[in-house]
């Protein structure tokens, strides 16, 4: 409840925010409670004076015989009632809000008392006005019996107005306390708050003034000396009183209704803007409107959980695959399409695992994978698999790309360059291929994964083995280079024609062009990749690193890069060079 939020968490800037300190909030509530009670009583006094002097002028209370009532009893009682009302109300409020003052969780008893506090404080005002009604009716009646109905009606009507206004003011002021109760799991059993407020506004703003007008007419008919002007003035004053009291009560009642609705609307705006973390509402209304706020928070919690699952799903299988899976019904199988595949395989993984602790190996591999994921995603590719210490990435599936081959080739060059700079402890062979694959869901209907199957997958894996001879230079098939745009193709040179292990068809091998100092070629004309950084000159090959030209680990990693088409990798086929390197 103390999270930092806005200044209208409780529907009004007067009530502060959730982030306020307990002391500041207590002072604010006490000040508003006192001001609310004083304002309500002043309004009631104005209504009483207006009705007594103008609304129902006859019989008059301003006669000489009533001086002791008007100038002694009434002022003294007002003073005493003010002191008693403030003291009594403070005692009741402190007693019922002791848990909030001490900043401890409320018990069920505390919750019941706090929920009844607006009525209790309002009834204190009603009791004081009731005493005034009885006392003044008797005192005025002793002098003039005709003043009894007038005094009874005027003072009791003013008291009812005070009680109604006090209740709405106090209920408004105690919203922060109600919010703490609701957050602690204490809620009203009955949901009649909105209806009760509406009925109260109608009774005080319409029913009682209309009854008053009828009584004025009755008094006029009962008294022969009452003129038509007196009846008109009395009815007019009561009508004007009804207009003002009705307007005030309607405004207060409507504010109690619209404030929770506005908070829900503000929360919906935050949800539509994608700000689910700050969309939760402070539930401060114990009526049906509070149920609306609670329901909105439940909806936001569900959306937040759904987005979390979507994000986790996307991290596991790729955001593009996740979106495609969520937008359609799951089914096995796939579609044939042209795509580029990129395979990256670590050199010397067995030696690394033998020389480093498992924790260190995981940290290094995570840095290694981070470089690959960044380069692939910057070029709209999909990291499809993490296979131990190898990675398979796809370009052109499930999202079509204008130049999938060029994107894959550019990603391969970026990976080779960045691995040398950012992960000097590891080097890797990188292979790129291009051709027709089947992309879709493979497995059983209960458990499947998105992947691609086809010869380009096998070819890129075998090229990554061959590329371990010189990790600075990724290798690509002739089909991949031919399918790429001219700008990217110019950054690759033909190297040889070979028969890769497990394949009968010969592969024309191209290698990325590097500078004479071993640095990767710079993009012409200073072009930049999607990350906005200009292709850097590749870093020098780390001296003293483990043998990258084909250690015993190559056969191990090559055997692990199993073909997606089911070719038997265990029967190695030696590489035959049909043509010497250019």
Image: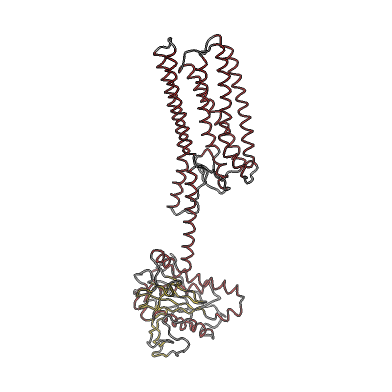
Give residue 515's position: percent from left, percent from top.
45, 77
Residue sitting at the far right: 102
Q: Quadrant of the C terminus?
A: bottom left
Which one is in front, 448 or 130? 130
Which one is in front, 289 or 336? 289
Residue sitting at the far front: 222
Model colouring: secondary structure
- Note whether 298 is above or below 383 in the view shown: above
Give residue 541's position: percent from left, percent from top.
52, 78
Quadrant in which residue 239 is drawn: top left
Give residue 573's position: percent from left, percent from top.
44, 90
Compared across the picture, whether 39 is left or right of 101 comes to left
Task: Please tell me which residue is depicted at 63% across the width and 36% down the height of the picture.
Answer: 94
> How many labels sit on residues?
0
Compared across the picture, whether 283 is left or right of 521 comes to right
Quadrant in which residue 575 is drawn: bottom left
Which one is in front, 270 or 160? 160
Which one is in front, 52 or 376? 52
Give residue 278's position: percent from left, percent from top.
50, 51
């Amino acid at each position: 409840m103390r999270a930092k939020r806005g200044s209208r968490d409780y529907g009004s800037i007067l009530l502060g925010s959730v982030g306020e300190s307990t002391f500041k909030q207590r002072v604010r509530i006490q000040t508003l409670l006192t001001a609310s009670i004083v304002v309500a009583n002043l309004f009631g006094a104005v209504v009483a004076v207006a009705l007594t002097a103008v609304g129902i002028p006859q019989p008059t209370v301003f006669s000489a015989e009533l001086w002791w009532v008007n100038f002694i009893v009434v002022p003294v009682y007002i003073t005493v009632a003010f002191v008693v009302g403030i003291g009594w109300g403070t005692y009741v409020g402190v007693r019922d809000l002791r848990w909030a003052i001490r900043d401890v969780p409320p018990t069920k008893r505390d919750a019941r008392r706090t929920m009844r506090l607006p009525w209790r404080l309002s009834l204190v005002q009603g009791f004081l006005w009731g005493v005034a009604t009885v006392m003044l009716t008797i005192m005025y009646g002793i002098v003039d019996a005709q003043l009894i109905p007038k005094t009874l009606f005027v003072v009791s009507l003013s008291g009812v107005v005070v009680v109604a206004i006090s209740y709405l003011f106090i209920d408004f002021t105690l919203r922060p306390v109600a919010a703490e109760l609701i957050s602690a799991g204490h809620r009203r059993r009955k949901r009649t708050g909105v209806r009760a407020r509406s009925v109260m506004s109608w009774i005080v703003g319409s029913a009682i003034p209309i009854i008053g007008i009828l009584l004025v007419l009755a008094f006029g008919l009962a008294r022969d000396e009452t003129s038509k002007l007196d009846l008109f003035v009395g009815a007019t004053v009561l009508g004007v009183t009804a207009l003002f009291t009705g307007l005030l009560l309607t405004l207060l009642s409507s504010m109690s209704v619209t404030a929770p609705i506005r908070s829900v609307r503000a929360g919906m705006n935050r949800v539509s803007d994608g700000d689910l973390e700050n969309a939760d509402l402070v539930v401060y209304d114990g009526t049906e409107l509070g149920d609306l706020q609670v329901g909105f928070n439940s909806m936001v919690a569900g959306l937040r959980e759904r987005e979390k699952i979507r994000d986790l799903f996307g991290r596991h299988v790729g955001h593009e695959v996740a979106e495609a899976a969520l937008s359609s019904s799951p089914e096995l199988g796939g579609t044939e399409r042209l795509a580029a595949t990129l395979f990256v395989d670590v050199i010397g993984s067995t030696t690394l695992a033998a020389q480093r602790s498992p924790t260190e190996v995981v940290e290094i591999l995570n840095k290694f994978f981070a470089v690959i994921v960044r380069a692939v995603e910057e070029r709209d590719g999909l990291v499809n698999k993490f296979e131990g210490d190898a990675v398979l990435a796809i370009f052109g599936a499930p999202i079509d790309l204008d130049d999938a081959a060029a994107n894959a080739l550019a990603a391969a060059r970026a990976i080779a360059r960045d691995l040398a700079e950012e992960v000097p402890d590891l080097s890797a062979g990188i292979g790129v291929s291009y051709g027709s694959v089947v992309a879709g869901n493979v497995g059983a209907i209960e458990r499947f994964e998105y992947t691609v199957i086809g010869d380009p997958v096998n070819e890129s894996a075998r090229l990554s083995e061959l590329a371990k001879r010189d990790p600075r230079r990724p290798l690509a098939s002739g089909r991949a280079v031919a399918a790429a745009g001219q700008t990217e193709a110019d950054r690759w040179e033909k190297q040889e024609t070979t028969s890769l292990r497990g394949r009968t068809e010969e592969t024309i091998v191209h290698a990325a062009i590097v500078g004479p100092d071993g640095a990767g070629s710079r993009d012409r004309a200073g072009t930049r990749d999607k990350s906005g950084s200009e292709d850097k000159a590749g870093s020098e090959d780390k001296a003293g690193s483990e043998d990258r030209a084909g250690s015993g680990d190559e056969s191990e990693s090559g055997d692990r890069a199993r073909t997606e088409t089911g070719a038997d990798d265990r029967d190695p086929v030696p590489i035959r060079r049909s043509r010497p390197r250019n």
